[in-house]
Amino acid sequence: MSNTIIEALKTRRSIRRYKPDMVPQEIIDEIIDAGLYAASGHGEQKPIIVAVTNKELRDEISVKNCEIGGWSPEVDPLYGAPVVLIVLAPKDWANNKYDGSLVIGNLMLAADSLGIGSCWINRAREEFESEWGKELLKKIGIKGEWEGIGHCILGYPEDGAKPQAAPRLPGRVYYVK
């Protein structure tokens, strides 16, 4: 029996090389809308998404992320992707990591369904704990204390191909009947 949702869950892969071509705004908006439908604790819908398509800010985020990762300056931890969707959740929300993670999962599945590559990029927490991150949020009008959950980068895969999934490791399921 074939199910398109289960098939999408099994075939979505992280993309780590992107063309510089910008994703059209209407596709970005559709991906974001799917992210906003993620399940959330108590139905509170607390995570927010900051959509970055400005190349200068995208490059600044890359530099900050690279510094946190401890890599040399020529490394681009955003893999050349032209779009960065930053997922943040209130620092005082007990479910912030869980709810934000579900948002990122939805973003990646939605992107894949539209032929757009995606990848989860870490170090958002460290970015938005820094003065740089706090100032960025103030500058764009976001008030309050936020925890960076992750970045979902978007773009067109450089070679157009999606990697194949590695075989699933055995021994990861335990049944209690």
Image: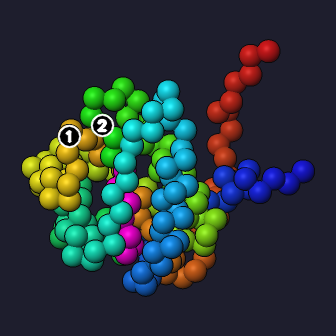
Cα–Cα gap, marks 1 and 2: 8 Å
Label drawn at residue 144: 1
Q: Residue at the location (15% across, 53% down)?
A: 138
Q: Position of residue 10 (x, y in %)?
A: 68, 54
Return the disc, 1 or 2, that comes first in the chain's sequence.
2
Q: Quadrant of the C terminus?
A: top right
102 displayed left or right of 97: right
Binning the other alpha carbons within 10 Å of mark 2 as few (below 14), some (14 to 19) or many (20 upward) gives some
Residue type (three-letter) at the residue carrying disc 2: Pro
Residue reaching furthest to the right: 1
Residue 156 in the image: x percent, y percent?
A: 50, 77
**Residue at (20% x, 40% y) in the render:** 144
Q: Which residues are magenta?
A: 81-87
The residue singled out by tag 2 in the image is 90
Q: Is residue 75 visible?
A: no
Q: Are marks 1 and 2 in contact (CB under 8 Å)?
A: yes
Mark 1 residue type: Gly
